Amino acid sequence: MFGEMSCVLLAGGAGTRVRALYPDLPKVLIPVAGRPFLEWVLRYWAQQGVRRFIVSLGYLGMHVERFLTQNSHP
């Protein structure tokens, strides 16, 4: 009906409230049930039919870029 669905994820927050627990991780990479939170979000939307993701990064964005590069599947 709508063609290929895309999703924009806002993932640039500094995570000030959780920084004491995870000082070297952006909040989207904080583990939840053994996986980074971002992975759960991406899996959910992929199951809903989203095939293209645009991730808007800010604080510690290079960590998220590395995670996405190392864990992307063609």
Image (cartoon, rainbow, N blue to C red):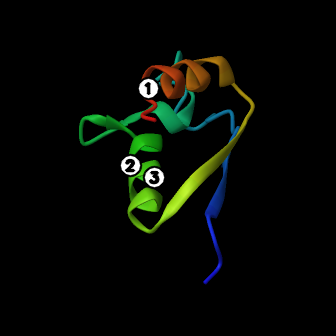
Q: CA distance from mark 3 to mark 2?
A: 4 Å
Q: In the structure shown, which secondary structural element does the residue marked by tag 1 occupy?
A: loop
Q: Do the CB atoms of the residues marked 3 and 2 lie less than 8 Å apart? A: yes
45 vs 5, nearest the viewer? 5
Residue at the location (46% across, 31% down)? 72
Callout in the foreground (3, 1): 3
Say whether residue 21 is left or right of residue 15: left
**Compared with residue 10, is residue 7 higher up or lower down, i.e. above or below?**
below
Residue at the location (53% across, 22% down)? 69
Q: Residue furthest left?
A: 33
Q: Do the CB atoms of the residues marked 3 and 1 lie less than 8 Å apart? A: no
Q: In the structure shown, which secondary structural element does the residue marked by tag 2 occupy?
A: helix
For residue 41, which numbered disc appears in the image? 3
Residue placed under numbered mark 1 in the picture: 21
63 vs 23, nearest the viewer? 63
Q: For the residue carrying disc 1, how many other residues have a C-alpha within 10 Å: few (<14), some (14-19), or many (20+)?
A: few
Image coordinates for residue 45, horizontal then vertical, percent: 47, 60
Residue at the location (62% across, 65% down)? 4
Residue placed under numbered mark 2 in the picture: 40
Image coordinates for residue 9, horizontal then vertical, percent: 65, 51
